[in-house]
Image (cartoon, rainbow, N blue to C red):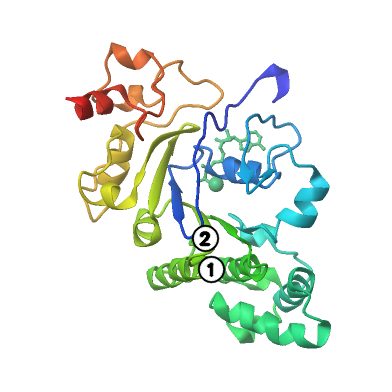
Amino acid sequence: MRGEKYVRAVSDAHFDLAAGECLALVGESGCGKSVLASALLGLLPGNAETSGSALLGDLDLMTADEQTLARTVRGRRIGLVPQSPAAHLTPVRTVRSQLEETVRELTGVPKPRSRKAAEAAAARAAFPADHLDRHPHELSGGLAQRAATALALIGDAPLLLADEPTTGLDRDLVERTVDELKRHTGEFRALLMITHDLAAAERIADRIAVMYAGRIVEHTDARAFFGAPGPRHPYARGLLDALPEREFTPIPGMPPELGDLPTGCAFAPRCDRATAACDVLPRLDAGVACHHALEAQRA
Ligand SMILES: Nc1ncnc2c1ncn2[C@@H]1O[C@H](COP(=O)(O)OP(=O)(O)OP(=O)(O)O)[C@@H](O)[C@H]1O
Ligand code: NI
């Protein structure tokens, strides 16, 4: 940023994802979820700096050049359901023409047959056929979301990256959309779903990674997280307890500024279990980045 200032949007993120698996990445607004997704696709803004590696098969996405990413990765090896579909769709062209072009480009279906294939792609994402000839600005948020999902599924990519794929959708459509993503993932593809919607995550995720202030603070089996023994990190527990169908108690305070993070645990100022030990940054160990949670586990 200007004036030699740095924003640490994502730090020490580490996870793997196998074919047939769904990992849900959850955490509140601004914690770094979309930055992580953009980094995997080589779509970070020009001033961003990255280090580390992200292997997709043998290809390191962090060091791959733009041509490789553009020609072989985006759409083909990683399908993206973008966070802001209205901004992602081309404003001056109809949904139909964008779907048809994507079908021809990614699947090699020739022009005469691309119309039918585009309609099938729309139907997969529950995008209504009678809206295909509309432009993006003529769509509601939920319809733009479905158009973006339809586009993301066309390339049959082995990894699907869905950034808030259910924003703006009603509950039954949320369920329908995540079920379709899960069905599409099947045995042979992997799904990384970024979401605020813990109910959607519970419905389809095998594993949950909880992010706070740019770090993954808990990474665990979804069944253990939503059922027993439940979340172990105090922040993750707070997220679940904040749900209306649970205790409906919000986490007090606000997340920190990522440009001005404490050296220790970033959640400590909001945590009722914080002690002097939390001045030392807890690393993710046995799936949780909290000194107290680890202690409780060892006891
Ligand atoms: N282009 C940018 N320039 C500077 N800082 C940025 C930029 N994009 C993101 N950030 C920083 O990275 C942080 C994480 O942003 P990100 O979009 O990943 O959050 P998120 O977890 O996806 O939130 P949301 O749930 O609202 O989409 C932001 O809080 C912001 O400080
Ligand atoms: Ni985001």
Q: Quadrant of the C terminus?
A: top left
Query: In the depicted view, which residue is nearer to us: 240 or 136?
Result: 240
Label 1, label 2: how many angstroms apart (C-alpha)?
A: 10 Å
* Tag 1 residue: 142
> Disc number at residue 165?
2
Q: Secondary structure at mark 1?
A: helix
Residue 10: quarter of image = top right
Left or right: where does residue 92 sit relative to residue 232? right
Q: Amino acid at mark 1?
A: Gly
> Eyeballing the image, is 22 above or below 145?
above
Q: Quadrant of the N terminus?
A: top right
Report whether residue 164 is seen. no
**Residue at x 49% of width, y 21% of height:** 261
Residue furthest toward the left?
299
Query: In the depicted view, which residue is nearer to us: 49 or 20?
Result: 20
Q: Residues within 10 Å of mark 1 (few under 14, many from 20)?
A: many
Where is residue 279 drawn, in percent x and y? 37, 13
Left or right: where does residue 191 sit relative to residue 244? right
> Eyeballing the image, is 234 above or below 73?
above
Name which of mark 1 and mark 2 comes first in the sequence: 1
Report whether residue 276 is seen. yes
Left or right: where does residue 298 sit relative to residue 106? left
